[in-house]
């Protein structure tokens, strides 16, 4: 949801919400840090009650630029600064890393960066440039997470499209030295050839799942259902979304040569889920269709399950 974006930059392709700064060339880490609005630090301050008593065992994570409280954490919590995230990624990928997008969500509580991997792979006849995603929270809600993903599109919502059968990810709780765990991350993440080979086989299976026009119509209606008690405006909105997804499947220039199959449908759903502008609908629809998390997008996951079972 666009309301969650505090600041960000993106390369070339404008995200559906139109927020952030656009640049023509992918920047290096120093440039990306500034463009993304992440050039601030988190400091820890003691927590004092209204009566002046110190709250033992807990501290507040506070942004130094505006003194915004990002979260309350225990004394054991170790801060991973935004600069640490870029330094870690630079060291992980080596010299010449270029960033595709990065930014701040929920007023600084969560931050991400997306870097292009140096190698390109050919999967199902397509050139795939995988990305490395670094995700961190400053509110104490979760661990540092890093994953490799072959996402085709670039925007703030590229925290998804990690197929359930082909993920490579690494995480670390906020109680250790992130730079000291660099080798551990490398060993976990960079069996890249094996990962991409596995992903290639998965995509090839999807490519061989031929879909009829009737199946595509049925799947779109399942993904975008009309609730029994929907108002006339909600019905109109859902039908509009169905038409949008239908166009992405049939008319997207980069998918026309792939045949009518599961691979094409998954890519169309991915493009829709990460770029379609949500219309005014119920909170249930918003949660199911446009939730973007590092664990995956529920709409893409559901589409994958349907196509796999075809």
Image (cartoon, grey):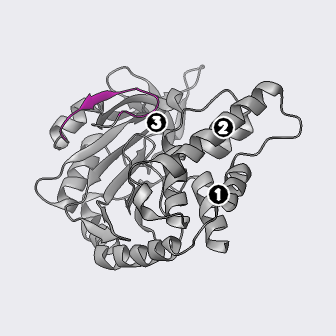
Q: Which dot marks residue 286? A: 2
Q: Which of label 1 and label 2 is nearer to you?
A: 1
Q: Which residue is mark 1?
A: 216
Q: Is residue 238 above or below residue 96?
A: above
Whether the magenta-drawn stretch holds residue 15 is answered as: yes
Q: Which residue is mark 3?
A: 109
* Residue in the foreground of this view, choosing between 67 and 202: 202
Q: Is residue 116 above or below residue 163?
A: above
Q: Earlier in the sequence, mark 2 or mark 3?
A: 3
> Which secondary structure, mark 2?
helix
Whether the magenta-drawn stretch holds residue 279 is answered as: no
Q: Residues within 10 Å of mark 3 (few under 14, many from 20)?
A: many
* Residue in the foreground of this view, choosing between 39 and 28: 28
Q: Quadrant of the C terminus?
A: bottom right
Residue at the image position 32 percent from the left and 22 percent from the top: 65
Measured Cα–Cα span from mark 3 to mark 1: 39 Å
* Residue in the foreground of this view, choosing between 56 and 95: 95
Q: Which dot marks residue 138? A: none
Q: Which of label 3 and label 1 is nearer to you?
A: 1
Q: Is residue 166 above or below residue 288?
A: below
Measured Cα–Cα span from mark 2 to mark 3: 21 Å
Q: Could you tell me if residue 87 is visible in this image?
A: yes
């Amino acid at each position: 949801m666009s309301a969650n974006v505090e600041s960000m930059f993106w390369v070339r392709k404008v995200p559906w919400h139109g927020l952030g700064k656009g640049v023509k060339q992918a920047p290096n880490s120093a440039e990306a840090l500034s463009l993304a609005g992440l050039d601030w630090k988190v400091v820890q301050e003691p927590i004092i009650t209204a009566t002046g008593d110190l709250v033992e065992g807990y501290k507040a994570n506070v942004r130094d630029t505006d003194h915004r409280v990002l979260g309350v954490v225990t004394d054991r919590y170790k801060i991973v600064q935004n600069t640490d995230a870029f330094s870690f990624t630079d060291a992980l990928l080596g010299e010449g890393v270029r960033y595709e997008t990065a930014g701040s969500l929920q007023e600084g509580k969560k931050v991400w960066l997306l870097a292009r991997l140096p190698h390109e792979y050919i999967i199902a006849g397509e050139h795939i440039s995988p990305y490395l995603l670094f995700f961190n929270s400053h509110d104490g809600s979760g661990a540092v997470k890093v994953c490799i993903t072959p996402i085709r599109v670039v925007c703030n919502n590229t925290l998804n499209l990690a197929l359930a059968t082909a993920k490579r990810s690494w995480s670390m709780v906020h109680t250790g030295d992130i730079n000291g765990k660099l080798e551990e991350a490398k060993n976990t993440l960079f069996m890249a050839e094996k990962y991409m080979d596995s992903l290639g086989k998965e995509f090839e299976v999807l490519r061989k799942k031929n879909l009829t026009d009737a199946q595509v119509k049925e799947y779109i209606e399942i993904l975008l259902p009309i609730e029994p008690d929907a108002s006339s405006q909600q019905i109109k909105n859902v039908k509009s979304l169905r038409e949008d997804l239908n166009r992405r499947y049939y008319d997207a220039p980069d998918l026309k040569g792939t045949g009518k199959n599961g691979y094409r449908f998954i890519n169309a759903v991915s493009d829709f889920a990460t770029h379609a502008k949500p219309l005014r609908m119920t909170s249930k629809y918003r949660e199911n269709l446009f939730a973007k998390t590092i664990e995956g997008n529920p709409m893409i996951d559901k589409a994958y399950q349907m196509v796999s079972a075809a």
